[in-house]
Image (cartoon, grey):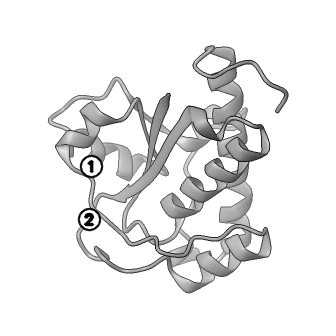
Amino acid sequence: MTKILFVCHGNICRSPMAEFVMRALAEEAGAAGEFEIASAATSAEEIGNPVYPPARRKLEEHGIDCTGKRARRLTQGDFDRYDLLVGMDRENLRNMIRMCGGKQEKISRLLDYTDTPGDVADPWYTGDFDQTWTDVERGCRGLLAWLRLEKKIQQKDF
């Protein structure tokens, strides 16, 4: 089983979108049982809050339910628990590395699994949830393809 933790600043927009998109893609591929997928924040600002309404609506537009998701904060123990910690931008990576005691070998950015590496813009500031959806879906598809190439999941048609 591959354990993936998606991380952003508040765990109410980008990282829960990635968590639920990745779950949906894994299920669509018949590989849901091969993953444990979750998300967390680098800040404490939104702890306990649900997915931000525009992010929730964007997921719903694509038939994805995120009911019950509440923001939680990344812990140092998450580094040991998860196989991959996937941040949304460079600032997340810096904070993730710091919060994990300087360890970084399991830490990456979501769009680094695509042919156009970079940051997933924070829709809290941009207001562009369509672009965030596009980036998150593309990144999750790229991550799933990478895991397949690395043979961390069974070979299936994606």
135 over 81 or under it: above or below: below
Which amino acid type is shown beneath numbered disc 2? Ser
- Find residue 2 and report its horizontal and vertical position in percent: 49, 30
Task: Give the residue at mark 2.
Answer: 43
Task: Give the residue at mark 1.
Answer: 95
Identify the image quadrant of residue 62: bottom right
Q: Residues within 10 Å of mark 2 (few under 14, many from 20)?
A: some
12 over 90 or under it: above or below: below
Horizontal arrangement in the rendering, residue 115 relative to residue 10 (left or right): right
81 over 24 or under it: above or below: above
Residue with the most extreme right position: 157
Residue 17 at least partly seen: yes
Q: Are marks 2 and 1 in contact (CB under 8 Å)?
A: yes
Closer-to-camera residue (45/154): 154
Mark 2 or 1, nearer chain start: 2
Closer-to-camera residue (150/95): 150
Label 1's element? helix
Label 2's element? loop
Horizontal arrangement in the rendering, residue 107 relative to residue 43 (left or right): right
Q: What is the quadrant of the C terminus in the image?
A: top right
Which amino acid type is shown beneath numbered disc 1? Asn
Closer-to-camera residue (18/127): 18
Identify the image quadrant of residue 134: bottom right
The residue that appears at 18% across and 32% down in the rendered structure is: 102
- Find residue 10 and report its horizontal and vertical position in percent: 37, 68
Q: CA distance from mark 2 to mark 1?
A: 9 Å
